[in-house]
Amino acid sequence: MNVVARRARVRVTGTVQGVGFRPYVYRLAGELSLGGYVLNDAHGVLLEVEGVSAAVDEFLARLGPDAPPLAVLERVVAEELEPGGQRTFTIRESPRGEIPDAPVAPDTATCPDCLRELFDPVDRRFRYPFINCTNCGPRFTIVRGVPYDRPSTTMAGFTMCAACRAEYEDPSDRRFHAQPNACPVCGPSLPLLDAAVTALRHGAIVAVKGIGGYHLACRADDERAVSSLRARKHREDKPFALMAPSMAVAESLVVLDDRGRELISSPARPILLAPRRPGAPVAGSVAPGAPELGVMLPYSPLHHLLLADVGETLVMTSANVSDEPIAYRDDEALERLKDIADLFLVHDRPIETRTDDSVVRAARRPMVLRRSRGYVPASVPLPGGTPLPLLACGAELKNTFCLARGTRAWVSHHIGDLQNYETLRSFTEGIEHFARLFAVEPEVVAHDLHPEYLSTKYASDLDGIELVGVQHHHAHLAACLAEHGEAGPALGAIFDGTGYGVDGTVWGGELLVGTLRDFTRVGHLLPVRLPGGDRAVREPWRMACSWLVASGIEPPAAWRQIAELARSGLSSPRTTSMGRLFDAVSALAGIRTEVNYEGQAAIELEAACDPSERGSYPIELTGAPLVIDPRETIRAVAADVRAGRTPGVIARRFHRTIARATVEACVRLADTHDIGLVVLSGGVFQSRLLLDSVWSGLAGAGLRVLVPERLPVNDGGISYGQAAIAAATL
Ligand code: ZN
Ligand code: ZN
Ligand code: FE
């Protein structure tokens, strides 16, 4: 028998805080009769174990494989120490003055253990809508400050009963140090669940207070309910998200592959965008004209009860009116939603930070299109690190901000479009909240070059801070590079709706060669006029008119005034926007001449594509910097329209044309600049069709392709790109 005593010190890094790792280590050490300690510090978890040599070996062998479900171990480094005769094992306090690396975890879907208890008639938490444990439950949305313990959460007002307190204090219990621990005796309550279930079954619209805010819910198969929700919400066309009662029901709505199943049931429980199944049992107004449906599964015990009782798929859309941010405070929700909801399903656990549902898609790789509840505030590595703590303010639309120190970046939840007071307040309060939680006192602030963005103005109003202005498309490129741990140089094809160029014009169809430090614009889409500025974004027919003028085609007589603007350039800035070219073709093909949300014309153009069509249009690549000149394309589109070709054929030919031109341009520029790495980013690449065909084409030409995965391909990723550039420049 091996009785030689050994002592080992183990450093564990990764996502190991706030995920039940210390009690897990405590239990494992106890099982193997080892002495020692475990603690959280600024680098992760530090522990020492001492005992019989074979037991220490077994401990080290099982430490990773047996770790709790939410733990992600990046590195485990063990070293031998002299044994000190320690027999007992303790959970120690964090060292004074040390800031834990990850003081707050993301909100996490109800775990299988809690779910079993929730539906177990003899469990003391049977049908309790706030059941949670160390492995699941609310985190980020309830935290008010650090250190992360009960008094600094919105659970502070609920005093644990003796039974809950005993679980909380027992290191061998699943609820050891579970800060939101509660039960029907001592915790939050939810009156009216039965009334809400009945109302929903009968076609009512119910405001449901969830984890990060209120949802508006109604039966997804009830056309009358869904269309009245649309009317009351003033949301004309934007698709509604669905919550399906089970995976089986989700699969009757959308086509899922293994990756899709994994994403939709992951602990983050995002909304998954997936191809709509023909004959999916949902009302027409759920997602008019959209080839995909956004589906999620229940993620809180309240949702599990609600969906189980109603037994039907529900529309679950963020509770707001038009462009306002999601409602999350009770008094404000009651006021703002009183004309929309027939009934309110409200509980008394306050929400501290408003957080929308995240949106993902399972393409060739998983893609996060909106990174919010379930993902935030997990840190993202910042390769190379930053010498000074910094703040990056992000873009204007789909804003996020980002704080960074050392080799970590914290990208905020989706803030929204910084175009109204409510959203600006979320932005400024959010920055203060993150700065406190993660102990970042920014000495450097990165911002967009656009002088009129509220985020830029916020940055320039700060005193005594070094400012770093970052070009929008460079930020897209850098975000993707940094996320993949690369520094460049890379060739970036960055296609989006709008971004302020270094020449003061509106960029958006950019070919850049760049690193995390700087970039050169090596190519772009042919510039045309944006007739009437921002109005051209809402009215794609204006862009159609502008492209006709640029291509030497006389626009219809009704468009004469706008054609004049396009010709004279009066209040019509120049733009190389790829998004606006898609808008123009959508309008020319008769699909969308006016939009209710940004990107709608392009989304419907993609949806219209006739998959059997194999043709494409001529397009030119000329000069240096390389100009993608689609005037021939526009003339061919106009000819197809005159010839009465279907929108589906035109849409498909156009997509194939842009994909081919992008691949050709990249191959040519990669060769000229001797670069083997291409980054595809910008909101236009939210098009599954375009991304897939460009990706295949580039890979076929032997180029390595990188696409944003963990951060949004749209402007939600800009703040992280700004942070990466500021860090590399300092
Ligand atoms: Zn649990
Ligand atoms: Zn209790
Ligand atoms: Fe952008």
Image (tube, rainbow, N blue to C red):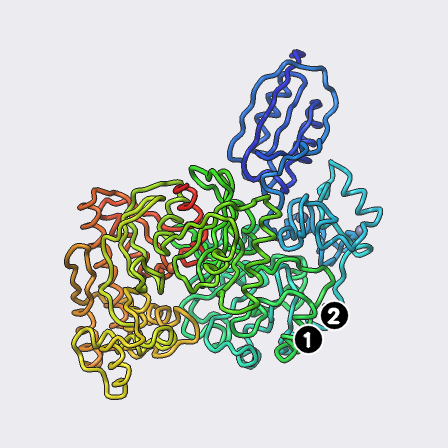
Under 8 Å from ligand 2: the CB of mark 1?
A: no
Q: Distance between the residues labelled 1 and 2?
A: 9 Å
Task: Check the picture and name the quadrant holding the C terminus.
Answer: top left
Q: Is residue 1 visible?
A: no
* Secondary element type, mark 2: loop
State whether residue 379 appears in this view: yes
Q: In x, y percent, where is residue 686?
A: 38, 60
Instruction: Name the residue beneath numbered marker 1.
Output: 343
Question: What SS does tag 1 mark?
Answer: strand
Q: Are marks 1 and 2 in contact (CB under 8 Å)?
A: yes
The image position of residue 316, as x and y in percent, is 57, 68
Tell me how many marks there are: 2
The label number, if any, that marks residue 192 in the structure image: 2
Quadrant location of the N terminus?
Answer: top right
Q: Which residue is drawn at 34% across and 47% down?
A: 706
Tell me the quarter of the picture where residue 341 sits: bottom right
698 on left or right of 719: left
